[in-house]
Image: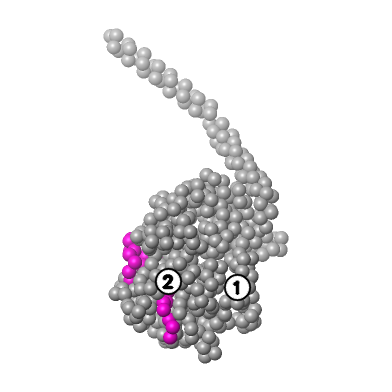
Amino acid sequence: MIEEFFENREIFITGGSGTVGKALLDKLLRSCNVGRIYLLLRPKKYATHSERLRQMKEHLIFRRLMSEKPNEFDQKVTIIPGDVEQPQLGITPDYMEKLKNVSIVIHSAATVRFDEPLRQAIKLNVGGTYEVLKLAEKFENLQAIMHVSTLYSNPYLEYIEPKVYPAPMDWKFCLDLCQRNDINDDMLDILTRKLIIGFPNTYSFTKNLTESMVNDFRHKLPLAIYRPSIVIQALEEPEPGFPTGFVGAMGMFIAYAAGILKGVPTTPNIRLDVSPQDLVTKHLLYYTMKATKSYENNERPKDIPIFHTASSSHSDVTIIKYIELIKEYKICEDVAFEKNFLIPDAVVTENRLYYKVVFFLKQFLPSLLLDGILQMMGQKPQLLKVQRKLFSTLDVLKPFMFNNFDCSGTSCFDEMYKKLHGTDFNIDVMKYYNNRFVHAGFIRDMMFKSREILLKEDPETIPRSRIILKIKIALYRLMQLYLVYKIYDRVIMPNIPEWEWNAESANNTMAFNSSFMQMCSSK
């Protein structure tokens, strides 16, 4: 079905070096006989186009593709040098000529940093999308543009419907604001705090503005919006557990397994609404096909098509339950990291003060000590930098760690499940999305692949790492026993005679009172 739709099509993808872009490229090349994929990539001063293509092809996400279709990448992928911050994306007339037969545009280029300065966030997310839309107006064979947004573009709402909500500000005004030279960065930072009221960060604010802009272009172009929740590792392909990177939820899991994260500030009922990378890819391609059909014969839908991918309707697994699963199935002990600092464990609390105490005692001080040792040995300190990043990341994520965001779930799920069953785009795995044992398997695959791909650790070193981790756990337990013994020896033992005397005195007093009462009653 999807295979037939994309057969021989020419597709233009922005953000090809990002998480969604690479997964999309891999799936299209492996499962669809596309005509040509044009990939927008920023030029590099010291790398030619052929070198950029080679570097891209060497990414491990294409490992399966290279074994199954070794020539597909070279035959079907063309790099288009450009930059979303430039007018018309900085694409030269020669390369524009190559794009004349493009029928599908998938725009996933964006900054995903939550703490990005407002000026840069607007330039990349709002301005970049604006340039993509202006460019797409020149494509004569265009049938659909899929704009990749986020489920958290309206974070002030408890329930998110598949529709465009009114933006808090006019996108044209904001775009003009960031391009003005008479407003410096300091002034813009002050304005930021006033502009993004109701939004926890510049990322969700600019994504909201971008959706408003895309909606304004719906009468000119065949547009659709796709909102996935938190994108995490792949469940099945290209390899089970293939990781997205060190950011967001993935970064938290890796930091936990490495014994670096010791405190998680959240409330017990907060769900972790995640969208596995391979399901995001399959959904995105299905929704692109569906959006294209809604614009057939020059027809225009009344409202812009909007699609969601979310786990809230299929899974009730909370952040705490994920940690409980890791402990219950001893996943960190099974897939022990070489780069393991302390034993994997974490305190989950909604008390911010307690979290800060845990951070200081269990994360900051041990990291400070180890970095000091590394410096004395002439090596570069690393852990304090990681701890600062962890603390700031969890602080930025605070609105998402203390609030649940609900929606109707994955769009067209029943329709997709039925139509894609038995194809290379099946979403059968979602049938088992709420099974604890299956979730434990997903987490184990993620840890295993993160160890190999992100941490660059040879899988053959796992048995040795398990032994080292067991020794660390044993030493930690011995230290706990020693501490308990010292408390008993120094605090409890010296006070036992006094407690015994007090107990004897109390018994004597009670006996005297009893005798006295009996005498009084007899008289």
Pick the front one: 233 or 75: 75
Residue at 65 percent across and 61 percent down: it is 456
Main SS, magenta residues: loop
Report x, y in % for residue 175: 40, 82
Residue at 62 percent across and 66 percent down: it is 68
Q: In this picture, is 496 found above or below 439? A: above
Provide the secondary structure element on which disc 2 rests. Answer: helix
The residue beneath circle 1 is: 72
Front: mark 1 or 2 = 1
Quadrant housing residue 79: bottom right
Part of the protein shown in magenta: 140-164
Q: Residue furthest top?
A: 522
Q: In this picture, is 201 found above or below 358? A: below
Q: Residue furthest right?
A: 377
Residue kind at label 1, given as amino acid type: Glu
Q: Does the magenta stretch include residue 486?
A: no
